[in-house]
Image (cartoon, rainbow, N blue to C red):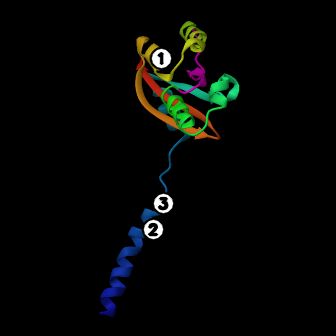
Amino acid sequence: MKKIVLMLLVAMIPFLTMAQKRSKKGDKQAVVQVEGLNANVEYMVIKGIEFPMTNEGMDNKELNATGQDVREMEMKRLIKPQVKLIIAFDFGNERNKEVSEMMRVASNFRSMAAAANAAAERGWEFVSANVLSVSGNTTHYYYMKRKK
């Protein structure tokens, strides 16, 4: 039995040492692979930041409301929130006429859906979305792509 175990260990040594050797690759090969890539898809991120409006937009009735009235006012705010929305389009390092046009009209959008619809009209396809809520502010990220 000891002889069999010893023979197996001796036979396994070459396999274990081969598994630990690294293959040699030239630096030029990696550069050629990166240069050879031609992406046929471009990506864009629509970032929307919601800032809640404070008591500035409330009238005296809302400020003096108590009990049932407060709950009713809160329900109205949930249905139609009073927020300021800032939208930005991130195209990466790209700068062209379309980018400047999208950034110019971004201030006119009242919702993230309006911004996504405007991007869809220009051929962008919705991929994914993330929503982050930090200290009362909500940040929306919409990821879009289109073929070049």
86 vs 64, nearest the viewer: 64
Distance of mark 1 from mark 3, alpha carbons? 56 Å
- Amino acid type assigned to the residue bearing label 3 in the image: Lys
Viewer-proximal residue, 113 or 77?
A: 77
How packed mark 3 is, by other alpha carbons closer than 10 Å (few <14, some 14-19, many 20 or more), is few
Kindly state the secondary structure of the residue where label 3 is placed: loop
**Label 2 close to label 3 by CB (< 8 Å):** yes
Disc sitting over residue 114 in the figure: 1
Which residue is rendered at x = 66% and y = 31% of the image?
Answer: 64
Mark 2: give few (<14), some (14-19) or many (20+) Cα within 10 Å: few
**Is 44 above or below relative to 134?**
above
Q: Amino acid at mark 1?
A: Ala
- The answer to whether residue 93 is left or right of residue 8 is right
Marks 2/3: CA–CA distance: 7 Å
| Amino acid type of the residue tagged 2 in the rendering | Thr
Toward the viewer: 2 or 55?
55
Q: Check disc 2 and report its element: helix, strand or loop.
A: helix
Marks 1 & 3, CB-CB < 8 Å contact: no
x, y percentage for residue 28? 54, 36
Question: Magenta stretch containing residue 88, yes or no?
Answer: yes
- Residue 92 in picture, x, y percent from top left: 58, 23
Lower sequence index among marks 1 and 3? 3
The segment highlighted magenta reads 81-96
Q: Is 60 located above or below residue 95 in the figure?
A: below
Q: Residue at x 66, y 23 (%)?
A: 59
Crowding at mark 1 (Cα within 10 Å: few <14, some 14-19, many 20+): few
Q: Tell me which residue sits at (57%, 11%) in the image.
A: 108
Please tell me whether residue 1 is drawn above or below residue 42 in the rendered image: below
Pointer 3 residue: 21
Q: Which residue is mark 2?
A: 17
Front tag of 2 and 1: 1
